[in-house]
Amino acid sequence: MSPILSVRSRASAARPVQRGLSLIELMIALTIGMVVMAALGALLLSITRNNSELAKSNAQIESGRFAIQLLQADLVHAGFWGEVRPATPTAIPDPCLAVASWDAAYKANMLAIPVMGYDSSTVPGGCTVVSGVQANSDVLVVRHANTCVTGAGCEGDTAANPDDGPHIQLSRCGTKSPPEAPYVIDSTTFPLTNRNCTTIADRRKVVSNIYYVSGNTLRRASFVDGSYQTQPLIDGIEAMRFEYGLDTTNDGSPDSYVSCAPCTLAQLPNIVAVKIYVLARNPEVTPGYTDSKSYQLGAATYTVPTADVGFKRHVFSTTVRLVNPSGRREVP
């Protein structure tokens, strides 16, 4: 044998023999891989579910807080009529009465009663703009003058698109004979003047908002160009309740809270604060979750409908002082 072949034979004999995986080794590897993939799948599914629940909870919190802030912002302005000091009301004004039917008595009563409330069973039959009110939920009426003078850049009021509908104008002239009326509420005629008794006084839009829940959505019916129009505001609101702080000692502070819906003619002018309770729920059902609780909205108990037990819920609440009605009663 040649030396070269001998060297090659020895090299081949020294090289380790190569072999593939046995069937048992392959099955073990596949099993380990499947276990790892199953664990990763379960982890991914858990993360996805947690993110979904977190998104639902965030939406619920956002809806509840936004509803509270919206109602609070409007109630703070309730009863703002400028320098007008309302007289004692003689009747409860219909919140949905057509503007064309507003007489002097109605206007005076509207100024004296800036906040009213109903529940789903006591809404006046003539209030067709308020339809489908959620059972076990209240309706809130808030009235005031616009905080912006008409023609000075108010929302929806431009030179090309003037804001029609009822406005309030106050007289500041005290030397005319016969004297001017202290105020007018009208849609077309505004004759009152400023202190110089010559310049026409500013006017402000009369704001009348009706808040209610329908179809798990907070809605508002409000004046737009002299007639009520309804718009959805916030989804995920299941119910809301209100308690009214009554000032019976005429000092501007509530002496007691009542859940009257509707309140009486003797109670309504004495409302100086409102407690708000809003029940918000997740936008979607949580799989495997059952809500069997009852929720306390002030003095009222809300029981979850059987068909909706799969939603998670939370109650939001706050107390709002009615700055204008209470301020007129404060004793220096």
Image (cartoon, grey):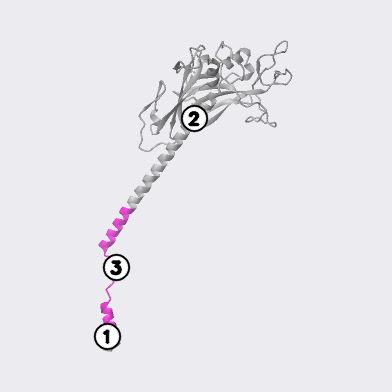
Q: Nearer the viewer, residue 50 or 253?
A: 253
Q: Nearer the viewer, residue 149 or 236?
A: 149
**Label 2 amino acid?**
Ala
The residue positioned 29% from the left and 59% from the top of the image is 29
| Separation of residues labelled 1 and 3 (CA atoms) | 29 Å
- Where's residue 113, x and y in %? 55, 16
The residue positioned 49% from the left and 30% from the top of the image is 67
| Separation of residues labelled 2 and 1 (CA atoms) | 94 Å
Q: Nearer the viewer, mark 2 or mark 1?
A: 2
| Outermost right residue | 198
**Marked residue nearer the N-terminal end (2 or 3):** 3
Query: Circle 1 is placed at which residue position?
Result: 6
**Marked residue nearer the N-terminal end (2 or 1):** 1
**Label 1 amino acid?**
Ser
- Where's residue 257, x and y in %? 45, 17
Query: Circle 3 is placed at which residue position?
Result: 20
Q: Is residue 1 magenta?
A: no
- Where's residue 62, x and y in %? 47, 35
Disc 2 crowd, CA 10 A, few/some/many (<14, 14-19, 20+): many
Q: Quadrant of the C terminus?
A: top right
Left or right, 317 with respect to 12, comes to right
Label 3 element class = loop
Q: Nearer the viewer, mark 1 or mark 3?
A: 1
**Label 3 amino acid?**
Gly
Query: Circle 2 is placed at which residue position?
Result: 67
Which region is colored magenta?
8-36
Where 174 falls versus 239 (above or below)?
above
Where 292 falls versus 12 (above or below)?
above
